[in-house]
Amino acid sequence: MALDRQEPNDKLLEQFGRQILVPGIDEQGQLQLSKRKICIIGMGALGTIASQYLVRSGIGEVHLIDPDTVEESNLHRQINYSLNDIGKYKSEISQNILNSINDVTTISSFPTTFEEYLKEQAIDHFDLIFDCTDSHQNKIFSSKYCKKKFISFVSISINSSDGIYFSQNYKNQNKTSSCFECLFPQSKYDHRCLNSAMIGPVAGFVTSLACTKIIFALANQDLRLKSEICLIDLLTSDINKLQLAGIKCPH
């Protein structure tokens, strides 16, 4: 269970001492991380890597959401699973794997969709929602929900050797901020990666970049998450960053 602390104790300093030394984290930042609550939607290639890094950073509470079960074709890129897990719920297996990492983070698993999760859970007090799904429709839905509830939002996607990072600091902005659909309009096709070309390290690179941004943001008392898009091409090693301007969101 997440510990209620006002000042960093010896155990916190021992477990996360190397991270505390990083400029921009320090002891108070680590304490702030231990009080944060986040939700990871999708426990596939992106979500499994994200869950490992974010739990290991010492975030206080993490909810894992995914209705899918493990398949053999998942194993080359989804790092929480093995052959023994085929047919089992991804969220539950991930929780079991992550529970033994530290005694700072409380982890809950929900083998359901984000929409179904919202019918039973009140999440207005979350600090950040991280959409790691491969569903364009789900990203539109989760982005709009975060904007409505003033919850900071991050989404990542990959396809072959390309990746997209999208973030909006809805927590500190008004409701006119752009949502995911403003920049990536909905089409009649809901692309998923079920049959897409994929190599595991691409998921690792894109997720590592996102988690680094998330950890620094959550370590800051004001949650200074930048509203931006990063377009990533691993074949050319190019990362193009676009700062998002304030617009009147029509959604």
Image (tube, helix red, strand yellow):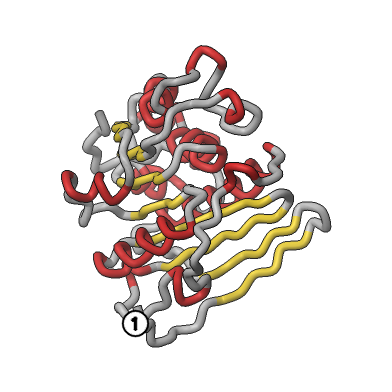
Q: Amino acid at mark 1?
A: Thr
Would you identify the image quadrant in which residue 174 lies?
bottom left
The answer to whether residue 19 of the structure is visible from this angle is no
Q: What residue is at 37 percent from the left and 26 percent from the top?
A: 95
Q: Quadrant of the C terminus?
A: bottom left
Q: SS of the residue at dot 1?
A: loop
Which sits in the foreground, 9 or 130? 130
Residue 227: % across, % down: 48, 70
Residue 103: % across, % down: 34, 25
Q: Quadrant of the N terminus?
A: top left
Q: Is residue 123 above or below residue 243?
A: above
Residue at mark 1: 176
Instruction: Classify mark 1: residues with Cα within 10 Å, few (<14), some (14-19) or many (20+).
Output: some
Residue 198: % across, % down: 69, 42
Q: What residue is at 35 percent from the left and 46 percent from the top?
A: 39
The answer to whether residue 166 of the structure is visible from this angle is yes
Which sits in the foreground, 61 or 145? 145
Residue placed farthest to the front in the image? 188
Q: Is 24 situated left or right of 91 in this image?
A: right
Q: What residue is at 46 percent from the left and 47 percent from the top?
A: 26
Residue 142: % across, % down: 36, 59
Which sits in the foreground, 201 or 191? 191
